Amino acid sequence: MKLLLKLGSLIGLLLTMIPPILVFLGEIDLDTTKLLMTIGMIVWFSTAPFWINKETDVG
Amino acid sequence: MPSTLFKKVIPESNEYERTPVPAKSLKSSSSFLGMYAGEHTAGTEFVIGPLFVAHGVAAGDLILGLLIGNLLAVLSWGLITAPIATQKRLTLYYQLERIVGKRLVAGYNLVNALMFCFLAGSMIAVSATAVGIPFGLEMPTLTDWVPRTSGWVITVILMGSVITLVAIQGYSYVARFANLMAPWMILIFVGAGFIGLSQLGVNSWESLISISNEVIWTGIPLEGMSKFTIWHIIFFAWFCNMAMHIGMSDLTILRYARSWKYGFLSFAGMYIGHFFAWIASGILYAVFLQANASSSAFAPGEIAYQTVGIAGAVCVIVAGWTTANPTIYRAGLALQGIFPKTATWKITAIVGGITSLAACFPALVMKLLDFVALYGLLLMPMGAVIFADFYFAKRFGFQSEQALNNKSHFSVPAFLAWTLTLLICLGLNLVYGIDIFFLGLPGWFIAVFLFVSLSRIYYSSSKSSLA
């Protein structure tokens, strides 16, 4: 379960990071970029809380 | 800027407040790396980058100035703060109390708390610029000092109330939320830079250079703004965290470091937050100015929303919030030191009230660069006192930790070093017109000189040994 959550978080971060690069390269338009980044944000915030602070607390 | 991952390094309980941190409680380098990267990629970054653009910095001056200034800041942490922190392993407040006495520490705490309130206030205002977007709130402009509309005041007070209520519930929840924010927010800044550049038509190295020089950092300030040179950038980048490094606030954090070399890990914060994030937010503002040539609004929320969409606006809201909350917490801690018998929630409520009131004034955002410089300058002399006490007491023949050794609550040399330094700096500003950004460096040497000279008079070690 934790692995799936981490995978979800990774997808969230990739959706935040890759669309801006693609719009810079002219591969996608700005509206699509904004939409993908919003989805990335939702995915990150709905998966990361379940594992990120647990690891921080241990560290 | 204030810590978002503060709790990761500093445990929630107030352990080792008056004793050195023991070896078993020391933290690894990765804790410090993460803390510095998170701490310096915060809400303030959404304001500082655009203000550089507004002040007409040239592109080459910005890049070179940031590289040099941030390097000097890293060296200050590594060579000045960390060696003392890892030898003494005491909090700033306790270390200061041993040198300057309880009463002077109370004065220091009061100034510190007020500065924290204003800083938190500016962050609430930053968040409000994003919260107001769906309501069509009229945004403040670069030259605004007082609130423009009642809508702004209502939004800010509401935000301030919510943030204060959360702060009263406890710091832990917000610290956990800040941990969650950090990696995503860093990527939002990087992404915003790429989107901004594409919006400005950058598609090659040549166009990057020309657009940087001709569109983003043109070297021409906006109307009503002063002109910034490379020296402004170097000194601002070096001294925007003056309170933390040469002001010694980070003794409290770095006392947990296994080695003094951990001070150099501040490079993560400097070169992610104070380099890439400032550049990215500057690019966002240039995009905003291109699209809204007639607008004089200066609203980080609107600027981020226009280029990055909903994710950008949410990032501004939460970045402002997660910066404001630990700052309110720290202000409360500083005040609690003065009024130890008052309940924590009451102190937090008072701090939140002052902060919310301050947030109504857009001047705190528009003059953030000057405020940050002032904040560091006001606290820096006490850092110089700690430095001089640590390195020069034996060499120049005065008692170290004079308040502790003389059972005094008030050190006259420290008080005079603090106030005279600030008066001299004020004089340099008023008489010679030296900008506030440049006063930290001479101020530090003046404070060290005054403290050493006065300590030789008041607490000469030869006198005490004869007695």
Image (tube, coloured by chain):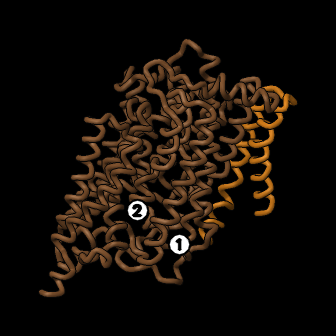
Chain colours: A orange, B brown
Among all residues in the image, which is located at the extreme top?
Answer: B294
Badge 2 local density, few (<14 within 10 Å), some, or many (20+)?
many
Q: Is residue B68 left or right of residue B338?
A: right
Q: Is residue B17 left or right of residue B299?
A: left
Of residues A37 and B386, which is closer to you in this image? B386
What residue sits 53% from the left and 33% below the top?
B52
Query: Looking at the image, is B258 positioned above or below residue B265?
Result: below
Of residues B30 and A46, which is closer to you in this image? B30
Give the image location of residue B251, x and y in percent.
43, 67
Q: Which mark is residue B248?
A: 2
Among all residues in the image, which is located at the extreme right?
Answer: A27
Give the image location of residue A22, x and y in percent.
83, 35
Badge 1 local density, few (<14 within 10 Å), some, or many (20+)?
many
Among all residues in the image, which is located at the extreme bottom?
Answer: B466
Which chain does tag 1 point to?
B
What residue sits 23% from the left and 47% below the top?
B423
Local secondary structure at mark 1: helix
Residue underneath mark 1: B260
Q: Is residue B63 left or right of residue B75?
A: right
Q: Is residue B317 left or right of residue A3?
A: left
